[in-house]
Image (spheres, rainbow, N blue to C red):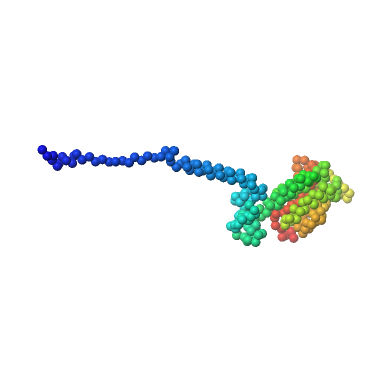
Amino acid sequence: MAQSPSNAHHDHVTIIKRKKVVKGDGHHGGAWKVAYADFVTAMMAFFLLMWLLNATTEDQRKGIADYFNPSIPVSRVSGGGADGLNGSSLMADDSAAKVGTGATGIGDGHSLEQMRHTDIQRDLEEMREELGDDPERLSEHLMVKMTPEGIVLEIVDSESRPLFELGRSEPTALMTDLLDAVSNSLNAFENDVKIVGHTDNRPFRGAAGYDNWRLSSDRANTARQLLAANGFPVSRVREVSGRADTDPLVPGDPSAARNRRISITIMTDAPDPAAS
C-alpha cells in the first residue's frame, strides 16, 4: 500500500552545521609579539644610551640634555649641529643670531637671559677647575655662587695665604695672581661688574680713624686697579665699595679668614637709568 503524501514530509530531517571556531592560545596568538617588540625596543634604547655616554664629550652630552629640557627654548631652525653633536641643529634663538640665521620668535627674553647666566656660571666653574691643576692651588681661594643681582665670584682669604698685607690695602703676590687668572674670564663677558671688599670682625683702627670700612673699600679699589691693569674696561665697573664685616661669608664664625674677601659680581640685571 502506497504512503500518503501527508506522512511523507515527517521523514525529512533538517541538519544544521555549526562551524567550530578555535581561538589561538598564548602560544599561537599575537600578544607575545607585542611584548617581545617592547622588550627589544627597550634594549635598543639602553644600548644606544650606553653608546652615547661613551662616544660623546661632556659638552655634547650637555647639548643633548638641553634639547630635552623644556625650559630651553629651541627654534625651528634645523641643520647639522655644533651645539649638540658638532653642528647647529639644536640652536636657540640667540645662537641663531650669532651664526646669522636669524630669530624665529620662539622663547621669551627671560629664558634666553637665563641661558646666558648659566653660561657665565659654567665658564667661571670651568676656570676654577683649570686653576685646580695650578701648583699654587689658586682655585682654593675662589668660589662661585648665584645671587639676585648676578653671579658672584668670591676671592677669599686664608690664614696661611692672605690676599692683602695685614691691615693694609696692598695686594700680596697671591692676590695679583688671582686677579690675573680671572681677568681673562671677566673680559669675555659683556656684563657690568660690581666689586665689594669685606673684612672679618676683628677690631681695627689705624691712624686718623682708619677702620674696617675704609680698609674694605680701599681693598675693593685695589682689585679694580688690578683688573684694569689686565685690560678690563673700567667703563664696565658699576660699583666699588666696602662693607667691612657686615656681610660675613661664614656667619657662624665672623672672625674666620674666609670672611676677608673680594666679591666680584657679574651683574645680570639692567643698569638703573636713575642711577646714571
> Where in the figure is residue 184, as x and y percent of width and height?
76, 54
Q: Which residue is at a point 82% across and 47% down the rendered structure image? A: 174
Task: Return the residue nearer the eye: 136 or 115.
Answer: 136
> Where in the figure is residue 248, as x and y percent of width and height?
76, 45
> Where in the figure is residue 137, as x and y percent of width and height?
78, 44
In this view, the residue farthest toward the left is: 1
Q: Which residue is at a point 74% across and 47% down the rendered structure image? A: 130
Say which quadrant the C terminus sits in. Answer: bottom right
Task: Return the residue nearer the eye: 146 or 188.
Answer: 188
Task: Return the residue nearer the eye: 12 or 258.
Answer: 12
Residue 268 occupies quadrant: bottom right
* Res. 22 visible in picture: yes
In this rendering, is residue 13 above or below 273?
above
Task: Return the residue nearer the eye: 148 or 11.
Answer: 11
Q: Is residue 131 left or right of residue 53?
A: right
Q: Which residue is at a point 73% across and 53% down the rendered structure image? A: 266
Q: Which residue is at a point 46% across and 41% down the rendered structure image? A: 31
Residue 257 occupies quadrant: top right
> Where in the figure is residue 216, as x and y percent of width and height?
81, 49
* Res. 141 visible in picture: no
Say which quadrant the N terminus sits in. Answer: top left
Q: Is residue 205 left or right of residue 14?
A: right
Q: How many marks?
A: 0
